[in-house]
Every structure is written in structure tokens, then in C-alpha cells.
Image (cartoon, rainbow, N blue to C red):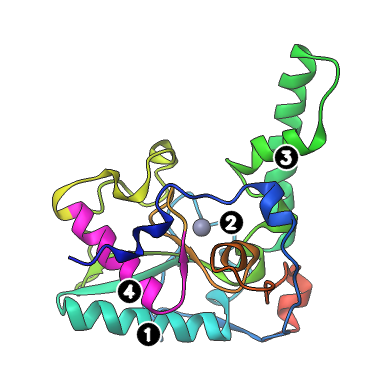
Amino acid sequence: MNTDANAFIGSKATYMQLIGVHVEDNNEMFICITPDVFPSAYMPGMKDMQGLFPGIPLRTSVFNRLRNARRIVKSQRPDLDLLLTYGYRTLEIQTELFVKELEIEKMNTNNAQSHVDENELYEKIHRRIAVPLVAGHPTGGAVDVTLITKAGKMIDMGSAIYDFAAHTEPTFSVTGVALAHRILLRNAMAEAGFIPFDFEYWHFSYGDREWAYMAASSHAIFSQKSLHEVQSMM
Ligand SMILES: [Zn+2]
């Protein structure tokens, strides 16, 4: 079993590290992924984008990489398939989610101490919900994926997708068949050029700040986009 991609185990870029990454958007177009072109479905609890587009929006090259990852999965396990469960999130929704967390955190912190360092505050919240300026999903470069059977049934991945209670557990903390599935998913995605996020086995990215930081690229190639911007980039 190939676990060479383990170099990133336990790593997670901090807000301060990500904010230091230079971004030059390459203006790559978006494409909407519908189930007839690629297995895709929003999961319960993650349907905030549903209805805004006819499918799941992604940058074009991200979709091409995803197709490669699917080919790799199927070549190794013809009984399995790759399912896309999330892609682009509007900058507006990301900001709304972040501001909600910020307000809760500010209220808690204000009660405990008089001076609050904003960077420290952002860092703390970033571990739960990404700060909009560095967030991956609003760039159209981050994807959430998992493995399913050819018939479309979920398989054992050790924990359910979006189980944020298992959020502090690194990808390789499970055992047996679940571990084998996580490694298959991770290796296929890595081979297709994605960077894994080791505290959410389903989250991978290409082109965003996280990718640039982890891949030691000189700059990120995708910046965050508003709903209106993406509508004009299709
Ligand atoms: Zn994600």
C-alpha cells in the first residue's frame, strides 16, 4: 500500500501562514458539474449552495484533475467510484458563516478579557471556519469528495463525510478497510495534483492559498470570487 503522500500528515496551514501567500488569479473560467457528467451531489447539511447554480461550480482545470482522479480510482478499484459533494462556495456565504463565528467568539472573549488581538481571534476561528480572505471553497479550487460503490452507495471511510466531531483526528487515524479507502482516495487525488487537508479526509484543493503553501508554489492562482463574478465566469 502506497502511503508516500504521508509527508503532510498532521500539517495544517494556519491563517497567518495563508495570509502571507501571494495570489495572482489566472481568470480561469468556472464550469458547473451536474450528475450526468460526473457523480455529484450536495450532502445533507451542506446544501447552502443548492439552487444558486444548476450543479456544483468548479474551476475548469480543477474539474479536469478530478476526472483524472476518478480514472485512477477506477483503474485500481473497478468496483468503486469518486463522488463530488462540494466545490465553489460564494464569498458571500463564506463571509456570513465566518461573521457568525466571529460574533460568538468576540462575545466569549470579551467576557474573559479586555484586550483582544484580532489575528489571534481570526486564527482561532480559522480552525473551525476558514477566514474568507484565505478560504479555499470560494476560489473554486477546493473540493470535497469521497468514495462510493459503482452503484452509488457510501462505503466505510472511518467516519461520515462532514463529521466535524472527528475533525481533530488526522486522516490516517483510522484502521483496516476504512484506512485503505482513505489512502486510495488521497493517493488518487494527490496523483491528480490536489493537496490534501489532513483533518478532513474529504477536502482537497488545487490553486488556492492552501495548495500554494503546501506545494511551495510561488503564488496561488485562484482568488475568492463573489456569486456575481462566478456567474460572469461561466
Ligand atoms: Zn471542504
Q: Which residues are magenta?
A: 178-196
Dot 2 alpha-carbon crowd within 10 angstroms: few under 14, some 14 to 19, many 20 or more: few
Residue that appears at 53% across and 49% down: 12
Residue 141 locus on image (x, y percent): 58, 72
Real-space CA distance between mark 4 and mark 1, rounded to the nearest whole angstrom = 8 Å
Residue identified by numbered label 1: 68
Instruction: Tell me the crowding category of disc 3: few under 14, some 14 to 19, or many 20 or more residues within 10 angstroms, Cα based.
Output: many
Left or right: 233 as drawn, with respect to 171: right
Q: Is residue 23 left or right of residue 140?
A: right
Label annotation for residue 188: 4
> Which of the two discs, 3 and 2, sits closer to the camera?
3
Circles 3 and 2, Cβ within 8 Å, touching? The answer is no
Spatial distance from mark 4 to mark 2, Cα to Cα? 28 Å
Query: What residue does disc 2 label?
Result: 48
Residue 19 in view of the camera: yes
State the residue position of label 3: 122
Outermost residue, right side: 115
- Of 210 and 100, nearer the camera is 210
Classify residue 52 by image quadrant: bottom right
Hey, what amino acid is under mark 4?
Answer: Ala
Q: Earlier in the sequence, mark 3 or mark 2?
A: 2
